[in-house]
Image (cartoon, rainbow, N blue to C red):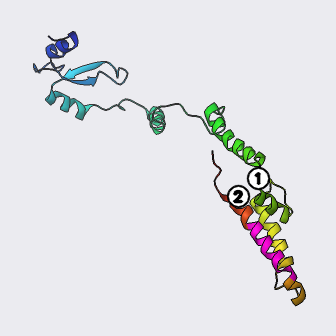
Amino acid sequence: MLNTNQKEKQERICSNPKCNELGVYPAPKSRDQLRDYLYFCINCIRDFNKSWNYFEGLNEQELEVEIRKSVTWDRPSWKFGTKNINYDFEKAFNRFENRKNIRNKKVLNKKLENAFRMLDLSYDANIKEVKAKYKLLAKKWHPDVQNENQSNKNKDKFINITNAYNTILKSLTKPAKT
């Protein structure tokens, strides 16, 4: 048993007045009526498609508007910074800020605490500050800079500074766990 939609499709005759075949293939009636259809047979729809021009009758400015609309898939768009930021977009960026705060507030393990203390840095120091402090201390405590007596005494100091620096760098460069 056929429903009304199927019956309508079977009874449709080609919209071309010179043709009496079954009209199966839809085509828009006009540029302004894109959702209203004429139905054609296979041969007539081929002819219709060859001759139909969506942009026919548009002046230069209207054509430019259509081209610009097609760049954004006919969706509205705004210049960057002129529209209020989307809540979800803002929430995503706040997540990074929250991660930073969590990392700063978490209890640091003893080795990392000692490393910060060794380099005389605060726990919220960034990589640039850590590198600058290490460079300063390395110049001061490097065995090649010390005389022979001081070199033996301070060799361990330089090794401890280097180990502390590496520990801090590892903690700052490894990805934060969520």
- Which quadrant of the structure image shows residue 99? top right
**In the rendering, at what x and y percent does residue 115 appear?**
79, 63
Q: On the rendered image, what quadrant is the C terminus found in?
A: top right
Residue 102 lies in the magenta stretch = no
Judging depth in this view, the residue of 70 and 93 nearest the camera is 93
**In the rendering, at what x and y percent does residue 172 appear?**
71, 57
Residue that badge 1 annotates? 108
Q: Residue at position x 19%, y 15% from top?
A: 6
Residue 101, above or below 37: below
Judging depth in this view, the residue of 81 and 100 nearest the camera is 100
**In the rendering, at what x and y percent does residue 103 appear?**
73, 48
Residue range (magenta):
153-165
Residue 16, above or below 174: above
> Residue pushed farthest bottom?
148
Q: Amino acid at mark 1?
A: Leu
Q: Residue at position x 84%, y 65% from top?
A: 118
Q: Is residue 145 left or right of residue 27?
A: right
Q: Residue at position x 20%, y 11% from top?
A: 3
Q: Is residue 50 left or right of residue 72?
A: left
Sequence-earlier tag: 2 or 1: 1
| Mark pair 2, 1: CA separation | 10 Å
**Mostly what secondary structure, the magenta segment?**
helix
**In the rendering, at what x and y percent does residue 87 appear?**
64, 31
Residue 161 lies in the magenta stretch = yes
Residue 98, above or below 32: below
Do the CB atoms of the residues marked 2 and 1 lie less than 8 Å apart?
A: yes
Residue that badge 2 annotates? 171
Q: Amino acid at mark 2?
A: Ser
- Which quadrant of the structure image shows residue 2? top left
Q: Residues within 10 Å of mark 1 (few under 14, many from 20)?
A: few
- Which quadrant of the structure image shows residue 36? top left
Q: Residues within 10 Å of mark 2 (few under 14, many from 20)?
A: few
